[in-house]
Amino acid sequence: MSAPTIPVLLRWQGTLQSASSGALGRHLHLIAGLVLCALMAGLPLVTRSGLSLLILASGLLWLVLALRTPPAPLGEIDRWILGILALALLATGFSPVPLAAAKGLLKLVSYLGVYALMRQLLATAPIWWDRIVGALLAGELVTCVIGIRQLYGDSGELARWADPNSVADGTVRIYSTLENPNLLAGYLLPILPLALVALLRWPGAARKLFALTALVLGVAALVLTYSRGAWMGLVAEAAVIVLLLAIRRTRAWPPLWRKLVPLLLLVGGAALLVVLVTQVEPLRVRVMSLVAGRQDSSNNFRINVWLAALDMIQARPWLGIGPGNDAFNQIYPLFQQPKFNALSAYSIPLELAVEAGIPGLLAGIGLLVASLRTAIGLWRGDGVFSLPALAVIAVIAGLGVQGLTDTIFFRPEVQLIGWFCVATLAAGTAAGDGAARDRG
């Protein structure tokens, strides 16, 4: 069988493979892992300047690693990512505000540098998945404790997130170190499936207790943000995890029970959800705001922003206005309805189409489908990345549901966790699901 063809785009990789390796070269993977752990632990705790330095360091480390590592064929996920990058480059070049769009392009490239380093590290040493997740859970624990403690402090600060024009007026919402309850919820949402998988995967009582504590406090903090989109995302994550675990556990059962058990679990979960919504006052009030239509101020605001975003897409349907919030902030005022200022389209599909046109939206959907296909394939196996793939499927479901009505995903505190999940899938494919690798 002939060797797979290496794309011209990647043939610069490995050019320093034969160079002598000093102390830095021998410990490059360790340094990369430590930088990534610091980045993931510091997402909710480090200043934006600190995050920028860690992101830059990750990109530079990937560049050094790539120069020392022979290139490999591109997987399906990597091809879609390159397509998204190419469309972002075109959208920037044809943007009506190219300088602002260039800033968004630079952010995208920097995030992809982190993704590339994660993918390279996980494909080479899968054990770093557990270490990076451990760092992520450590930062999440600190953030949750700070957020829950806000309930016992000065309620005046929390009150600034209470909307007097909403049917949920008076609801106290925590925000911890992220200064925004919706952002806190968006940050916690992709971490919870990772914490659950860590609980199932990690050996030893101490590690399991650590993962369980992170999971319980994370769920409590997410609920206390009173973010409706995150609540729906959490339900979607729970449904996906229960369904997939039930299917796996019942693979050897008789056909009838293999079909009935997952269905009964979903029906039971739905019944429990109905009981909670009808019997717990804060939940009932918040859920009522979902069906209040324009009578709820938050709903009304989003509807007006979505209508303006559709006008922006109609005006530039093929390459959009260019990537990033700076470009959006300069173009949106030309389309906004009076008194409805916005920093984004408040919907991931709309945001993708606004930034890079219909092709950008289709590329995003392509990456989503490729990621789900890869994750399901890994989950069906029994390799190193099987349980992590379960977490990624749940994360995709949760962020997908939340992303229909919010764009918190584009904040680095959330987006970098998303890229970690995508890197997990790409690394699982590149490593052949790690079946022949030494976990240690």
Image: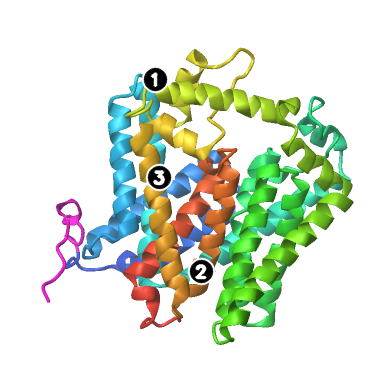
Instruction: Please tell me which of labels 3 and 1 falls first in the chain.
Output: 1
Q: Mark 2 Cα within 10 Å, few/some/many (few <14, many 20+)?
A: many
| Magenta-colored stretch includes residue 13 | yes
Q: Position of residue 227 (x, y in %)?
A: 71, 43
Q: Is residue 97 left or right of residue 412?
A: left
Q: Residue at x 54, y 17 (%)?
A: 336
Residue 97's place in the image compared with 48, above or below, is above
Vertical position of residue 243 compared to residue 235: above or below:
below
Q: CA distance from mark 3 to mark 1?
A: 20 Å
> Which element is circle 2 on?
helix
Overall secondary structure of the magenta section? loop
Q: Which residues are magenta?
A: 1-16
Q: For the residues marked 3 and 2, what is the alpha-carbon distance in whole angstroms?
A: 22 Å
What is the x, y in percent for residue 238? 65, 62
Question: Mark 2 or mark 3, which is nearer the start of the sequence?
Answer: 3
- Residue 364: mark in rendering: 3
Residue 67 falls inside the magenta stretch? no
Residue drawn at (23%, 58%), measured in percent from left and top? 67
Q: Mark 1: which secondary structure?
A: helix
Residue type at the position of mark 1: Ala
Residue ID at (57%, 75%) = 247
Which residue is disc 1 drawn over?
Answer: 315
Q: Is residue 27 above or below residue 349?
A: below
Pick the residue in front: 21 or 120.
120
Q: Position of residue 141 (x, y in %)?
A: 69, 59
Using a 10 Å C-alpha cutoff, classify the residue at mark 1 as few (fewer than 14 neighbours), some (14 to 19) or many (20 or more): some
Q: Secondary structure at mark 3?
A: helix
